[in-house]
Image (spheres, rainbow, N blue to C red):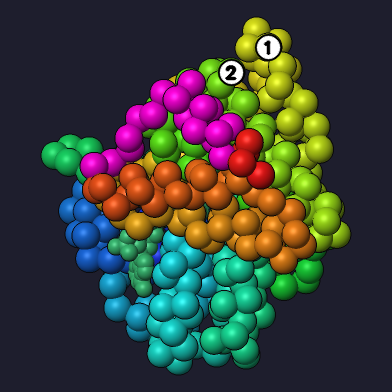
Amino acid sequence: MSSNSPHIVIAGAGSVGCYVGGRLAHGGARVSFLARERIQNDIDLHGMKVSDWQGYSANLDPSSIEISSHDRILKDADIIIVSVKSRDTLAMAQTIKRSGNTTATIFSFQNGVGNVAVLKTELPEHTIMPVMVPYNVLYTPGSKNKAAHFHCGTEGTLFCQNDSASETLMLAAQQAGLAMEYKPNMVNILWSKLLLNLNNPINALAGIPLKQQLEDKHYRKIFRLAIQEGLAVLRSAGINPGQVAAVPMGLVPVVLALPTFLFKRVAQKMLAIDPEARSSMWEDLQNRRPVEVDYITGELVKLGQQVNVPTPVNSKLIELVKTAHAMGQGSPCIDSMTLLNQVEAEQSHV
Ligand SMILES: NC(=O)C1=CN([C@@H]2O[C@H](COP(=O)(O)OP(=O)(O)OC[C@H]3O[C@@H](n4cnc5c(N)ncnc54)[C@H](OP(=O)(O)O)[C@@H]3O)[C@@H](O)[C@H]2O)C=CC1
Ligand SMILES: CC(C)(CO)C(=O)C(=O)O
């Protein structure tokens, strides 16, 4: 790391933040982590390992990692990467404000479409931009002789706004071999990613890995119905979803409708994932933490109400995930036929 390297601070060191931060640090960037005490203790004690499904793996020694639960770590940051769940965005914005930093460029590495606006309202002096995170990251806490492990289990490229303010981050990503691409219209990209995230509740309710879930034709049908609703809402709202998957968004329902043997072939890219990778919503549900569903599926349902397009399938999925969270027993592991019957019953009422 050169002495004039930009100082990058990960604001909310969890799955995404530690994976991205760990990779940037391993690539030579100066990275610090703002974390909760439990993550700080885990990394201080065991160090950090970052790896991906293609065999990339790097270990960071605890002595090389600057990690703290105190907001003073943000003070001299040049770049702040916000990687908290959406419910914590406002609190994180207030933490950044309290730190006294008024100049850092802030990037939201979050799902959902509302986080940048929340950050901008609290932090009007800063340049704030979204980055789309396409892949799943799983955190396995450290233990004796094992580092805290952040594993990226699916393929994909980070997308950021084609803007001069992204250049420093882009350079750090390139040096780290972390795939990142410029996109001209991140609003369309975020909505498109939100459509893919309509699968998060399905995966959380199914309680099985993404690969196994996508290989089941009934779960695929539920995902297809959810995306079709989403596409109808976006069409009415005049939003043209950008391409974030191997095929244009409009074709995703067609691919999902294929018989399983054909789907496996055509969607090879979609299925280029670790057999154990799951959605972040499953992780939250399983760990009895609040789910991000209002900020993802909920945003679509809200937009649907504004443009008068019904969203019974997605509304039902929200209800089921919230019920499961309230029960506090992790994923209810609803089998695909039962879940399909439930959402189709809802659809027939409209
Ligand atoms: N995980 C994944 O695979 C993917 C996630 N995403 C998106 O990325 C974003 C981040 O997700 P993910 O990495 O899973 O989230 P995590 O919950 O794993 O990580 C966020 C971390 O930030 C901590 N945190 C929250 N507020 C503060 C604060 N004020 N100060 C310090 N630490 C704080 C949280 O602690 P605590 O829980 O105790 O509040 C948690 O440890 C979300 O929007 C998610 O949807 C996108 C693609 C994939
Ligand atoms: C990577 C993906 C799409 C996996 O479901 C995700 O965004 C998440 O887990 O929240």
At x 66%, y 19%, the residue is: 268
* SS category of the residue bearing label 2: helix
The quadrant where ligand 1 appears is bottom left
- Residue 342 within the magenta-colored segment of the rendering: yes
Relative to residue 218, is residue 339 depicted above or below?
A: below
Label 1 Cα crowd, 10 Å radius (few <14 / some 14-19 / many 20+): few
At x 44%, y 67%, the residue is: 87
Depth order, front residue of 251/219: 219
Pointer 2: what residue?
A: 217
Depth order, front residue of 199/324: 324
Query: What numbered label is drawn on residue 6?
Result: none
* SS category of the residue bearing label 1: loop
Task: Looking at the image, tell me whether mark 2 or mark 1 is earlier in sequence order.
Answer: 2
Residue 173 point in image, percent of width and height: 61, 54
State the quadrant of the C terminus: top right
Residue 164 point in image, percent of width and height: 78, 71
Question: Which region of the structure is painted magenta?
Answer: 329-346
CB atoms of marks 2 and 1 within 8 Å: yes
Relative to residue 164, is residue 170 depicted above or below?
A: above
Outermost residue toward the left in this view:
144
Depth order, front residue of 261/125: 261
Relative to residue 291, is residue 271 depicted above or below?
A: above
At x 56%, y 39%, the residue is: 346
Pointer 1: what residue?
A: 259
At x 30%, y 78%, the residue is: 70
Q: How many marks?
A: 2
Depth order, front residue of 323/178: 323
Does 15 sit left or right of 197 as displayed? left
State yes or no: Cβ of the residue under disc 1 lies below 8 Å from any atom of ligand 2.
no
Question: Real-space Cα distance between discs 2 and 1?
Answer: 7 Å
Magenta segment main secondary structure = helix
